[in-house]
Image: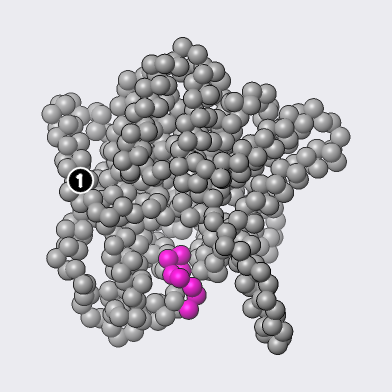
């Protein structure tokens, strides 16, 4: 079920009504409703995968209870390993089985040995990478005694399957989300209005920015040999805005929907394209995943402590794993490796924490140095996105080779030139709104402070009009495939 679908437009009000008008007096019933609604939401794609998420939920629930009782260190490690093996086992099978089989076959062919292994027509369960990491963090935190396990199975099932963020995040920690299922929830009008506002902005990002950029990015990437270097540069820029509008738009909608039900999820994107270096970019892009890798992989490996070799090893490892998390393709690994290369000079010179505050905080405009740093960082990021978007390594190399040819100096040419001009204007308006709202949780949060309701509602109606006017062919959220 897509957030930008008619199905969800019917599903959400029905669940909202049942939640606040039928089950509002009983916390247990509210949690049961969340579980049922979440399973309906998830099963809308393929009901068979409900057994997968249910099995993962049961395993981690009982692992958590057993970890709380067990005192013997070796047995506690065995319990944690059970959770890790079950969750990563499912993830590895559904997501990486064919990848390893194909590369295994290729490796043998170099030695003149031809083998015919069996590949499977495996359907990747939607959101498996997200809820797997969410449940893993629960088991690890209980193992480290940072968290007391829940004894209420309905509460735990609600935490694992909470439908707003189930299939594409944010990846919530049990320490933040789980306690919220134990507290009596009361309808808060201002919180609900703020949630609706964030949903609106998320839909604008997805439908107007991401989906329209996708049309041109797809045409250019899918037919890259037919276009000049200058057009390919714009293709990379279109994809950069597509993936940002798509993924951060999903997060905005998820956070906004959660607020309608009295829950607060953590911010997942903090205006990453206004970053002044790659380290700042990764503190602002997909924050829930970046902090997950930091806390459960990078820091346990030693972080930035130790010698130069340890720093290089840990940075390389965390970015390569991050790339591999995104998909079973060498392009994702190269994308992660590129970001590691960008990141290394900053951490080796201890400059990785230079830009902790949002750029030009308290000012209308950035300095020339800040502006140049943002453009340079965006350029490096967009270059890396080429590998992320490309079908394979050869495609990415050919794409980049053409960019750095003489055709880079020609004027870009599009098949639908009349339609691209309004898109450029929309992207510019989008950047301006994001810039002036960059100090908030999301770009239009500040609108609630406007003195005159007329201006607020005029803006909302303009956004709604633009969403309907520029809505085209429905595009699946990019991160559903991860």
The location of residue 117, given as percent across then percent down, is 68, 72
Image quarter where the N terminus lies is: top left
Q: Any magenta on residue 345?
A: no
Q: Report helix, strand or loop for mark 1.
A: helix
- As drawn, is 417 to the left or to the right of 63? left
Image label count: 1
User: Quick check: can you spot residue 280?
Assistant: no
Nearest the eye: 217 or 108? 108
Q: How is the image coloured?
A: one colour
What residue do we see at 84% from left, 38% from top?
Answer: 75
Please state the horizontal and vertical placement of residue 47, each as a whole percent of the image: 52, 43
Residue 18 lies, in percent from the top left, at 40, 21
Extreme-bottom residue of the structure: 112
Q: Residues within 10 Å of mark 1 (few under 14, many from 20)?
A: few
- Give the answer, above or below, for where 465 lies relative to 152: below
Q: Residue at x 50, y 75 (%)?
A: 393
| Rendered image quadrant of residue 190 | top left
Give me the residue at 36% from left, 72% from top. 222
Q: Is residue 330 above or below residue 365?
A: below
Of 233 and 200, nearer the camera is 200
Camera-side residue: 454 or 253? Answer: 253
Q: Is residue 391 magenta?
A: yes
**Which residue is located at x 46 percent, y 58 percent?**
278
- Residues in magenta? 387-394
* Rendered location of residue 93, percent (x, y): 64, 57
Q: Is residue 229 visible?
A: yes
Residue 23 against residue 123 in the figure, above or below: above
- Give the left or right position of residue 405, taking residue 299 as reference: left
Residue at the disc numbered 1? 468
Q: Main secondary structure of the magenta part?
A: helix
């Amino acid at each position: 079920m897509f957030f930008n679908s008619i199905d969800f437009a019917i599903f959400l009000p029905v669940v909202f009504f049942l939640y606040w008008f039928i089950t509002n007096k009983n916390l247990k019933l509210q949690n049961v409703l969340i579980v049922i609604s979440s399973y309906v939401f998830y099963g809308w794609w393929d009901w068979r995968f409900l057994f997968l998420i249910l099995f993962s939920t049961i395993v981690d629930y009982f692992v958590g209870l057993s970890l709380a009782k067990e005192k013997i260190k070796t047995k506690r490690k065995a319990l944690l390993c059970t959770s890790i093996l079950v969750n990563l086992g499912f993830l590895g099978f559904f997501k990486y089985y064919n990848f390893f089989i194909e590369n295994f076959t290729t490796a043998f062919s170099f030695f003149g040995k031809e083998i015919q292994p069996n590949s499977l027509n495996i359907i990747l369960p939607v959101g498996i990478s997200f809820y797997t990491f969410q449940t893993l963090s629960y088991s690890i935190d209980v193992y480290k005694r940072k968290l007391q396990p829940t004894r209420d199975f309905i509460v735990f099932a609600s935490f694992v399957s909470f439908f707003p963020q189930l299939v594409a995040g944010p990846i919530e920690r049990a320490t933040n989300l789980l306690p919220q299922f134990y507290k009596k929830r009361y309808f808060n009008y201002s919180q609900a209005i703020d949630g609706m506002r964030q949903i609106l902005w998320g839909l604008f990002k997805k439908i107007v920015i991401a989906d329209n950029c996708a049309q041109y990015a797809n045409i250019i990437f899918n037919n890259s040999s037919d276009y000049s270097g200058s057009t390919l540069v714009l293709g990379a820029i279109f994809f950069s805005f597509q993936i940002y509008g798509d993924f951060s738009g999903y997060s905005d909608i998820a956070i906004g929907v959660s607020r309608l039900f009295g829950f607060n999820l953590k911010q997942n994107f903090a205006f990453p394209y206004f970053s002044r270096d790659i380290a700042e970019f990764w503190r602002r892009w997909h924050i829930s995943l970046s902090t997950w890798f930091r806390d459960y992989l990078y820091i346990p490996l030693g972080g930035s402590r130790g010698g130069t070799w340890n720093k290089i090893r840990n940075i390389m490892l965390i970015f390569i794993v991050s790339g591999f998390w995104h998909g079973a393709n060498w392009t994702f690994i190269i994308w992660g490796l590129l970001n590691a290369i960008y990141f290394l000079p900053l951490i080796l010179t201890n400059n990785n924490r230079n830009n902790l505050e949002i750029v030009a905080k308290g000012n209308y405009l950035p300095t020339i140095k800040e502006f140049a740093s943002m453009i340079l960082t965006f350029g490096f990021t967009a270059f890396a996105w080429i590998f992320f978007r490309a079908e394979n390594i050869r495609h990415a190399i050919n794409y980049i080779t053409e960019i750095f040819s003489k055709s880079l100096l020609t004027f870009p040419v599009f098949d639908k030139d009349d339609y691209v001009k309004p898109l450029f204007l929309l992207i510019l308006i989008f950047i301006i709104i994001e810039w002036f709202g960059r100090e908030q949780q999301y770009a239009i949060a500040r609108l609630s402070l406007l003195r005159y309701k007329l201006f607020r509602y005029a803006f909302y109606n303009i956004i709604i009009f633009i969403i309907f006017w520029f809505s085209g062919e429905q595009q699946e959220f990019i991160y559903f495939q991860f």
